[in-house]
Amino acid sequence: MKLTLKIWRQKNASDKGGFVTYPVDGISTDMSFLEMLDVLNEQLTEKGEDPVHFDHDCREGICGMCSLYINGNPHGPLQTTTCQLHMRSFSDGQTITIEPWRAKAFPVVKDLVVNRSAFDRIIQAGGYVSVNTGGVPDANEIPIPKRIADEAFDAATCIGCGACVAACKNASAMLFTSAKISQLALLPQGRVERKERAEKMVAQMDAEGFGACTNTGACAAECPKGISLTNIARMNREYFAAVVSSENV
Amino acid sequence: MSWVTKTLSSTLGRKLIMALTGLFLILFLTGHVSGNLLLFKNDGGQAFNIYAKFMTTNPAVKLLSYLTYISVIGHVIYSILLSQLNKTARPVGYAETKSSKNSSSASRNMGVLGTIILVFLIIHMQSFWYQMHWGDLPIVSYDGEEYKDLFSIVSFAFQSELMVIGYVIAMGFLGFHLSHGFASAFQTLGLNHKKYSPAIEGLGKIYSILVPILFASMPVYIYFTSLS
């Protein structure tokens, strides 16, 4: 395959940045999108140019590290991670536009790499269960219905890649935050701190500068893990119930 | 900041206000369209004028009308606040977006649709609401009681093709706004349930088609009856 790549290049966070066009040749349809970028980077390195920086780690679709806004959609044309996107999804001679996630809360570090620490800070605000003392509890000590366990698990499959923020017209992080609130709110262990958690995580989400939700559903449609919008409704219920009934004045 | 102001200035709190005012305005539209069906009654506007007097003098209706004004103003102000916030959340936009792949155009353009509806609302209120309250209307009497003849103002206004076309187009925009807004308000309130959400979405689609069509049929009906 022969391709024309239109890639966003930006030296550092304060650089203005812009698109640079690169032709690449000899791309196999079996290559993953990231492997195709590896080919380009090898060529650039051989020429003594700065390779294109992009995030990646496991390349198995489970870590959530890869990003890229490809031809107008996060993770490209398929509802999967960029590492699981293959070049057979593109046609020979195609021009591919590659941009970083765009959000105030996800500043560009370099080229296509963005800083997603805002997500970590939302988790730090309350996305955990406090266990202060005692030994390891026995498995299945607390009975949890299968249906509830499945629902919590589905929410917990969020890998925090940020495609929801990238897809949302408001750069809202509600799908991410709601998945993290849901996975704990559904389980008895998480219910103990549910009010504090909902209030703190929503406050942190707002403080990071993410936008609000317009319920367009773009996030869920683009989520590589298929996180559902029902989580956002649950987060809203959790939050509204928390603010009216918690002791925080 | 107290917990109330803190909540109402959060993204979720602002969305809550949008949903509550939006749902109240949906209730208002239901009442408005049902009452105005009296325009179709072939009695020279008697029933409509009696209804119009009731709607402007009854104390319970007055209270509801104040709630409606507050809802309209609240819906507009909070939509501006949210739009500003949402704009700042993405200072640098994308060079290429294919958002039609993941969402409906109505859901992405609620602000634009709402602005068009607001412009229509101002013209609409100036034409009829203002006239009814402070305008110099002809007086008619039925069974010895005097009524403002709002019907004559309405039927005169809709003899103009421009007004009729404008109204029909505006109702189209209202339909698109409602097609997303109806179900979206329930989602924001957290009312998402396997059993009821499909029904709410279905009802929202029917509502967003039926109500604007009924509204639009009024000026069209009056225009064509005035011709004959």
Image (spheres, coloured by chain):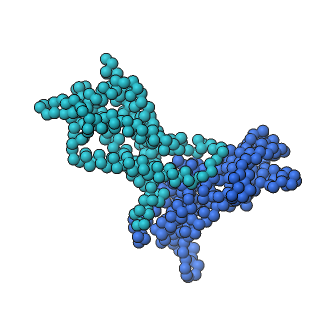
Chain colours: A blue, B cyan
Q: Nearer the viewer, residue A193 or A240?
A: A240
Residue at image position (60%, 50%) is: A167
Q: Which residue is farthest bottom?
A: A134
Q: Quadrant of the C terminus of chain A?
A: bottom left
User: So how many labels did they put on this image?
Assistant: 0
Residue at image position (83%, 44%) is: A25
Give how far across and how far down residue A105 sits, in percent.
Answer: 60, 59
Residue B18's place in the image compared with B8, above or below, is: above
Q: Which residue is farthest top?
A: B228
Res A82 visible: no
Give how far across and how far down residue A170 sits, in percent.
Answer: 55, 51
Q: Quadrant of the N terminus of chain A?
A: top right
Locate residue A50 relative to residue A203 in the image: left or right.
Answer: right
Residue at image position (33%, 18%) is: B227
Q: Which residue is farthest left?
A: B144
Res B101 visible: yes
